[in-house]
Image (spheres, rainbow, N blue to C red):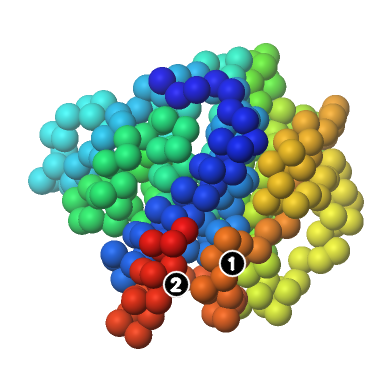
Amino acid sequence: MSKTAYTNEEIKRAAHNVRKRVLGLCIDRGGCYLTQACSSAEILNTLYMRILNLGPSLGNPDAQRFPGVPGPENMNYPKGSLYNGFDYANPDYTRDRLFFSCCHYAVVLYCSLVECGRLGEKAIEKFNVDGWNMEMIGAEHSPGFENTAGSLGQTVSIAAGTAHAYKLKGHTGRIFCMLSDGELQEGQDWECFNMAAYYNLDNFIVVADMNGQQLEGWTKDQMNNEPLIDRLRAFGWEVQECDGHDIDAITRAVDTPHPGKPLMVLCRTHPDQGMPIISPLMPKHFITVNDAVRESYTRFYENM
């Protein structure tokens, strides 16, 4: 069972450990979504270790075999032998629930689950290994994920629909959704934002990692969403902006009263936070470690 209360120092240490674990995987596997770990480590660990009201994990702490997309050869895969995000949070309907939309942040989520005791440390060894559920792009069979995620998976809309169902049924738990700022350039997100405000979903909280980059470069150079605060407020949302590397600032922003409105927390972050060795590469959606840089990256890792 994971702890129920963590100090700021413990959360800071967890965020540091997440970055180090992901860098180690990046070196070992030849590449990884390292900048996402740099930007979101404090956000995710503050959610799991400070903000979310979760029950003890029921998820398997070990990596699990995954046969792939169901087909004739694996239709008899034992029912219940795979766990999803609901199990690792174990919420009853009075507790919080986190839908994780930024599926390419999967490694950050796995490592954060390790830090708060919801996933075993050895499970990380199976990260991005064929035949296991610790995939680089997380899906509903991956630890911490409730659904095939991302904007194409319409996670924010699934989360809002769940919040609406909770309201209709009188459930008191809050529904959280974490996404990245690149996703805010997707049209279906804004359809969801419109709906969530229309139905007064004040049990719905979206936390966004605003690291300023997406697959093709800086978000501002692709399809600039600014002034984002004004746009979201025009849609009927309560909006708070904070330093996404400041644990207390994240906590205060999420605790903002928002009766009758959904809440958006925009966490401004840096994609090279704690990792100056990658600063010259920014913006960079995926970090590749080849023979030219492996020695310098390894030396940095050993001194972290």
Q: Position of residue 279 (x, y in %)?
A: 58, 75
Q: Is residue 176 visible?
A: no
Residue 223 percent coordinates (x, y) = 71, 73
Q: Amino acid at mark 1?
A: Asp
Label 1 crowd (10 A; few <14 / some 14-19 / many >=20): many
- Secondary structure state at the residue bearing disc 1: loop
**Quadrant of res 24:** bottom left
Give the residue number, with chain letter if any, for mark 1. 272
Front residue of this view, candidates 67 and 164:
67
Quadrant in the picture for residue 226 = bottom right
Image position of 121 (left or right of 266): left
Q: Is residue 31 above or below residue 207?
A: below
- The outermost residue toward the bottom is 292
Nearer the observer, 54 or 303: 303
Picture disc at residue 287: 2
Residue 112 in view here: yes
Residue farthest to the left, as pictured: 73
Q: Quadrant of the N terminus?
A: top left
- In the image, taking residue 153 as reference, residue 270 lies left or right, namely right
Q: Type of residue at label 2?
A: Ile
Which residue is painted at 20% across and 56% down in the image?
Answer: 130
Q: CA distance from mark 2 to mark 1?
A: 11 Å
On screen, residue 174 versus residue 119, left or right, reads: right
